[in-house]
Every structure is written in C-alpha cells, then in structure tokens.
Image: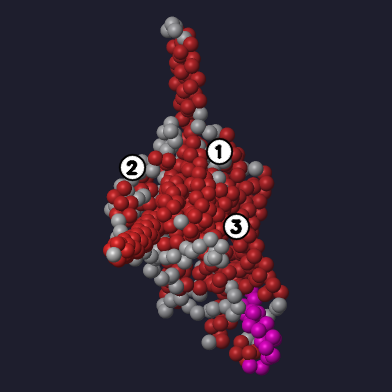
Amino acid sequence: TNTSKTMPTNKKKNKQKKKSTVGGSSSAAVAASGSDETIINMNARVLEALIRLADTLAQLDESSNPVDVCVGDDAGATEDEAVDGDGSCDAVDEDLAKKTAAASLSDDAVAEAAAPGHNEPDIAITTSSADAPTAASARTEKSTRTPPPALPLSHWRTLPLPVESAYQILSDGAEYIHATSTKYALVGKVDSEEGGNLAVELRKGAELIGTGALLLFSESCGSSRSLRHHVKQSSRAILASMISLVRAFEDGSARGKANDGNNVGAQRAGAVWSACDRLTQKLPRGNRAAMRRELMVWVRDCNESVGEFEEVLALGPRDNDDGEDDVVKGDGEDAMMDEDQYAEKEMGVAKSSVNVMKCSKNLLGLVLKTCECVGEHADASSPRRDHAEGQIAEKNEATEVQTDGQNDDNTQQKQTLHDADDDDEQRKEMLQWISNLHEMARAVGEGVTNLGILLYPPLDCARTSVDEKEELQMRREEKSATELESCTGEEGEHAIPILGLTGLGLQLEHQLRALSECVTSVHNASLPMSGESIRDCLSEEVVEGLERLMKAVKVRCREAEEALLAWDQVDTSEK
C-alpha cells in the first residue's frame, strides 16, 4: 500500500522535472535567437554608418575647397581623436565634426539596435545615376567649359603641422582597422555577440579615416588637387573593403563554425588589410610627392600611347582604302592586320598627332623640373615671421631699461617683421604659380589620352556640326580679330591654327592650345598677383629645354594644320 501511494508522487515529480528541462531548453533557444538578432542588427547599423561616411567622402570635390556636405539628420556625436591634445590642428571646426559624425552611433541608436524585433531598413550603397557624356558632347563642352581655378597651396616639400596631424590620423585609423578587422573576422564567425562589439570598433577606425581625409580637404591644410585625389581614393578604398566585410557578417555568408571551410570572412578581411597597407605605405605625403606622381603618370601614359601608335605607323598604309573589301577578300589574319592600319590619306594626320604626343611628353617633363626649381625657392623662403617674433620677444625680455639704443632696435624689429611678411607673400605666390602650372599640365596630360582615343584606325572624318562651314568661318574670324591662344617666343607670335570641325581636328587644336598655354606660362614665369619675375629660380636645364619646346610647338602647329588640310581635301574630293 505504501508503495502504491508513493509511485504516483514519484511520477509526478519526474514529469515536473522533464517539463522544467524542456522549458529551460526553450528559454535558452529564445535567448540565443534574440542575441543573434541583436548582433545582426548591430552589424546592420554599423554597415549603414559606414555607407553614410563613404557617401560623404564621395561628395568631396577634389578641384575646389569643400562646401557643406549633407550627411543626414541623425549625426550628433563628435570625434575626439580628430585633434591632438594640445589643439595643434585648427582645421577641425564644427562643420568638420558634423561631417565626421555621419558614421557615429549614438547611445539611443545602440539601444534601438539591441532591442529584439528591431526592423532594419534595406541598406544599399547609393551611386550616381547620371550617364557618362557622349564623346561628341564632351568635345563640344571642351571649348565652352571654364576650368576651375587652381587651388592655393600651403606647402611644397615641408609639411606644416596641420597636415602632419591629418596624416597621423589617417595612419592611426588604417592601423586600427587592420588590427580590428583581423579579430572581427576570426571572432565574428563563431561568437556573434563579441563580433557585434568588434563591428562598433571598426566604425571607430572608419571615423578616423573620415576625419583625416576631411582635414586634408580643408582649406587650412592647403592640399593640392593631386593630393586630394590620392587621399580620397585611398580612404574610399578602405571604406569599400570594410563595407564588404561587415556586409558578409550581416547577411550571414561569413558566419559558421570553426574549421568548417567557410573562408569568406578571411577573404574580405584580406581586402581590408590590402587597402590599409596601400594607405600607410603608398599614399604620397604632401603636395610635392602627390603632384610629381601625377605628372609621372601622365608621362608614362604618353610613352605608352606614342609606342602603341608608332607600331601602327610602322606597318605602313593598308593596300586598299576600302576596309570592307579587305575583310571579304583577305585571309583572316591579313584582314585583321589591314583593319589595324591607316589608309594612305590618314598617314599624315596620324604622324602629326603622334608628334604632338611626343611634344606633350617632353613638356610634362619640363613642368616637373620647373615645379621642382620654384618649389625649392619657395621652401627656402619659408615663413619667417614666427621665428622673427620669437627672436624679438627674447630680446625684449632680456632688456629691462628703455634706452635710445633700444628705440633703434624697435625700428629694426619692425623692419624685420615687414621683411618676413614680404617673404611669406612671395612664397604664397610661388606656390600658387606652381598650382596654376600644374593645372595647365593636367590639360596636356589628360589631352593625350583623349587624343589617343580618337587616333585608332580607321580615323573618323565625320563632322561634329551641321553648319560646319559657317561655324569654321566664324572661328577663323574670331581668331584673326582677337589673336588669342598664341605661343609667344623670340621669333614672334604664332597663333594656334583652326583645325576643322572633325573630332580629331578639335582635339588636336585643344591639345596644341594646352601646350601653348603651358609653354607660355613657363616662359613668362611671373607671379600671379605681384607680377614679379621668377625666371631666376629656373635652372639652365629648364631654360634650354623651354627654348627647344617653344620652337617645337610652332613646328607641331604647322604640321597639324597642313596634315588636317590635306586630309580634309582628300575626303571632300572623294565625297
């Protein structure tokens, strides 16, 4: 009887124990599910912040000083790491703090992301929907578009303190992202909660990158267009690789278990490392390094274009001007070779264009040497006012009694400060002259690429205007009346010829005009504001090269005019 009474009681206890076990397992599963959802939401929030910062950097204009950039209404935090403890970097202002805060997660946002069931909006990287302009419209814009003024520079070789601070911020951010991405890829795969925390740490590194880039784009840093281009390119590359990494964990493609063969996270982390290494190791430091690199890139492009089209010219003219007959009658290989050759009537224009490319390459080399000469003189006359004020302050502290001799010293001190101010103004004008010359060289370097695009056989002789005769006559009359766009030398003035209305003719004319303006600027060598001559800064090598190039530009103008006229006459007679 006792046994029968205790059995139901034991069964009841066992049932309650089983029920409790099942309930505990269910609660643990719910808790784990909630944790995973929280971490996914955290990754999504960080991803959204990175995309906002990437969009902010994409809006930065390399050719002008920055204006207000819309970064969203929820940006409210500031980045303390943007300024050194002693406040040495004055370029960080309220506007900069707002822009950098685009990647920040406020406490409310973190709490919202941590709330279970938080619905995250769809996230996508916004790209420009504007279509690329057609070749015809681009050629038309070249004659009417006004290039932006050259940016004022604050330095050449020696970096001022704000620029050094900005580079340090970029370097610190890249190193922090490099180290954190490694832990994020390893830990985030197996531990979702810790991975979400590391995602927030990644965002902090991205804020440093954004702050450093915005600093170098600020007017007070005086960065050149070339430097801004490299900074923007390197910063956006890091952010793009970070977005790819965080997205892989946000959508779950990089998550799993240890040693399961899923290496998506490691691959994305490797891309982040490469982008960070490129910034820390290959980003040019200062205006001189960035501008010289861009000039050498243009010289390399010129060499490649010249070599490519000289090989085509070496093949000689094709046997038959009718390309279709060549394709039908010739064998496959011979027909393809004929298609890569110029017609007899095109050989003169092609040779003239290649000679213009060679002249452009030589001019870019001259500009590089000229900038180096003027830049060295600008660095030699670096700002002296601070040094002069320091010497005057030390002298005044050492003198306790005012004497007549000290009155003379005061007069001398004022003169010293005045001379230092004059040196500073001259230095600023020298740097501005370098910036102006580099922008002229940009037109030459980029023009070679545009000319090469139009130079592949067979040449396009189509007109770019319906009323070509009237337009051509009007341009010739304007040129005769104003005598603008000329190359001035010892032998007199030589105007840039009117080379017709074909796409190739317009581009050749544009290239010769760019060559002429650049050569003239070096020949005049006068400061933009005071008009003071700086020809004494130029080395003998630069002066000799300049004289040769001035004669070469005149020869290239005459060759192009004769070649285009002959090509136009043959084409007109055939029609």
From the viewer's perspective, is residue 405 above or below residue 542? Answer: above
Q: Residue under label 2, please give it.
A: 94
Percent x, y of residue 569: 56, 80
Quarter of the image for the N terminus: give it.
bottom left
Sequence-wise, the earlier of marks 3 and 1 is: 1
Q: Amino acid at mark 3?
A: Val
Asked which secondary structure carries label 3, the reply is helix
Q: Residue under label 3, please give it.
A: 297
Image depth: mark 1 or mark 2 in front: 2
Identify which residue is drawn at 66% across, 87% down: 335
Prevalent SS, magenta region = helix
Q: Amino acid at mark 2?
A: Glu
Asked which secondary structure carries label 1, the reply is loop
User: Does residue 333 belong to the magenta stretch?
Assistant: yes
- Magenta stretch, residue numbers: 328-348
Sequence-wise, the earlier of marks 1 and 2 is: 2
Q: Amino acid at mark 1?
A: Thr
**394 displayed left or right of 116:** right
